[in-house]
Image: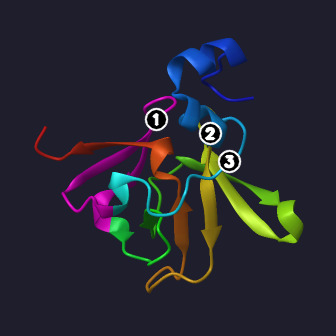
Amino acid sequence: MFPVTHTEEEWRHILTDEQYAVMREHGTERPGSCALNHEKRAGTFYCAGCGQALFASHGKFESGTGWPSFQVPEPGAIGTTEDRSYGMHRTEVHCSRCGSHLGHVFPDGPPPTGLRYCINGVALDFKPQDE
């Protein structure tokens, strides 16, 4: 189904326990717990599972939610599914390359898109532009 696949044992070897819980079991990290929430340098945020570029730093903004928030993903980098867990109706976002759960997208972001991609920081790797 996805270009990058691994067995559950391989995923457990590739990811930390917290990453596995979020990315493979659709968990959520504690709000405010990830340093990437405060990352302000120019660069790119990548999927921690497969290394695909997901978001450019110029689209990141402070949402006040405790999770890194972005306006626009890189073209083709994100897939979505309907999430009706916990009695809510949300749109889940996942990496289009490996299928890992990243977070959710909400229609309450700033202009011009009006979208807020609320992403678990542990699902991301950041590489500054100057590296």
Reading the image, the residue beneath label 1 is 48
Q: For residue 48: magenta? A: yes
- Distance (Cα) linking label 1 and label 3: 15 Å
User: Which of 37 and 42 lies nearest the eye of the viewer?
Assistant: 37
Q: Where is residue 42 in the image (x, y as percent from the top left)?
A: 19, 57
- Asked if labels 2 and 1 touch by Cβ distance under 8 angstroms, the answer is yes
The three-letter amino acid code for the residue at tag 1 is Ala
Q: Element type at marker 3?
A: loop
- Asked if labels 2 and 3 touch by Cβ distance under 8 angstroms, the answer is no
**What residue is at 83 percent from the left and 71 percent from the top?**
88
Q: What stretch is highlighted in magenta?
A: 38-58
Q: Position of residue 97 (x, y in %)?
A: 58, 34
- Left or right position of 83 against 126: right
Dot 1 crowding, Cα within 10 Å, few <14, some 14–19, many 20+: many
Mark yes or no: residue 91 visible.
yes
- Distance (Cα) linking label 1 and label 2: 9 Å
Q: Where is residue 27 in the image (x, y as percent from the top left)?
A: 68, 47
Q: For residue 63: magenta? A: no
Reading the image, the residue beneath label 2 is 23
Q: Which of marks 1 and 3 is nearer the N terminus?
A: 3
Q: Element type at marker 2?
A: helix
Q: In which quarter of the image is the C terminus?
A: top left
The three-letter amino acid code for the residue at tag 2 is Met
Reading the image, the residue beneath label 3 is 27
